[in-house]
Image (spheres, rainbow, N blue to C red):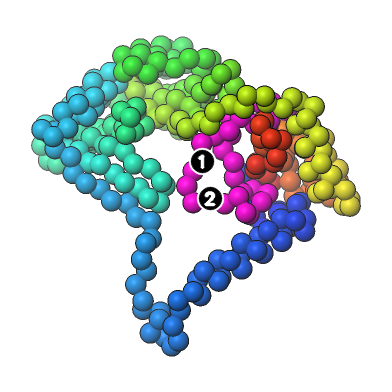
Amino acid sequence: MRFSSAIRTTLVGAAVVAALAASTSQLTAATLVGAGPGPANLAAPIVNQPATIESPLREADHPALFARAAATRNAFGFPVGSSRVGLHVQDDIQGAAYDEVTEVNSSGQPMAMTQFNSDGSLLDAVRFDSPALTLLVLSSDSATRTALRALTASGMAPSGQVRTEADQSAGGWDLHWDRAQAGFTVRGDETRVHVWRDGRIQSVARVEHKLAAAPIHPIGRAGALLAIVRQLTAWFGAASSGYAIQTMDLEWVGSNAAFDATRIVAAAQPYKLAWVANVRPSGAASESLQLITLYVDAGNGTVIGGDVAE
């Protein structure tokens, strides 16, 4: 899936084109502000640009972090280094901050690494050695049991149904547990584990976004359908194209600027409860688009983003 200006122009029409033009003109204006005459301006330093800053962390000063990293390492069966290196990473590019502990061998090579959010919850864990050469054919059930034991030992046992995908290149399995809140899926959030074909865990990752409060009186399916039809009619009403709404479900989603450039924000916002509609285009639009996904805010019925698949 990817976005393109051509898709937006064909699909969304004058409204989005105008919004994109407005945002482009604003960006151009912002670029020109403070520009002095002459080529000397080209050498002016760029200030206030996002950056990634790493600060060392000593075990003596952060014993709880290093203890948590050791417990996580042991739960996943990762190798133990001769020393450990801690870092606090402030990633302004991604709008994230996390703590990282790396197991290092006597030669200074990393052996395993764990990363934690500021609240102590696990973000990622990975080992850097290689799987053992074996003819063992690991079943998905065995891989799932291994992953569940390790996740439980680490204090982050997932709930719900697991999805398994065989690793066709190196063997082993990728296991996914989708996150749900108040009975609704959090779109894109999951706990993911990769198990090598020799039965050892190679990596663990957890994607988890902050959630906004659920609306006290969410709109029903009928209200959401009206908003979706209104938007689709604006797009397709005067075109040689049509559409069919395939599915509509309540999910937690992140608003985005897919169909409205004015929704571009500097930092990620908490996910909102929304009606998610998958729409199959027909006619001329189907030549370039396979699927349109719309997010309708369950609180106020406005379109807050979505996605397109070419």
Query: Looking at the image, which is closer to me, 281 or 263?
Result: 263
Point 59% across, 45% down: residue: 256
At label 1, the amino acid type is: Gln
- In terms of secondary structure, where does tag 2 sit? loop
Residue 294 seen in render? no
In percent of width and height, residue 224 lies at: 75, 31
Q: Quadrant of residue 129?
A: top left
In percent of width and height, residue 253 lies at: 58, 34
Q: Is residue 172 above or below residue 145?
A: below
Query: Looking at the image, which is closer to me, 143 or 114?
Result: 114
Dots 2, 1 in contact, CB < 8 A = yes
Query: Looking at the image, which is closer to me, 84 or 122?
Result: 122
At label 2, the amino acid type is: Val
Q: Which residues are magenta?
A: 248-276
Q: Residues within 10 Å of mark 2 (few under 14, many from 20)?
A: few
Q: Is residue 185 above or below residue 51?
A: above
- In terms of secondary structure, where does tag 1 sit? loop
Q: Is residue 285 above or below residue 99?
A: below
Q: Quadrant of residue 202?
A: top left
Assess whether residue 275 is covered by the magenta stretch: yes
Residue situated furthest bottom in the rendering: 38
Q: Which residue is mark 1?
A: 269
In percent of width and height, residue 71 lies at: 23, 21
In percent of width and height, residue 51 lies at: 34, 55
| Mark drawn on residue 265 | 2
Point 75% across, 56% down: residue: 15
Q: Is residue 162 above or below residue 214?
A: above
Point 41% across, 46% down: residue: 95
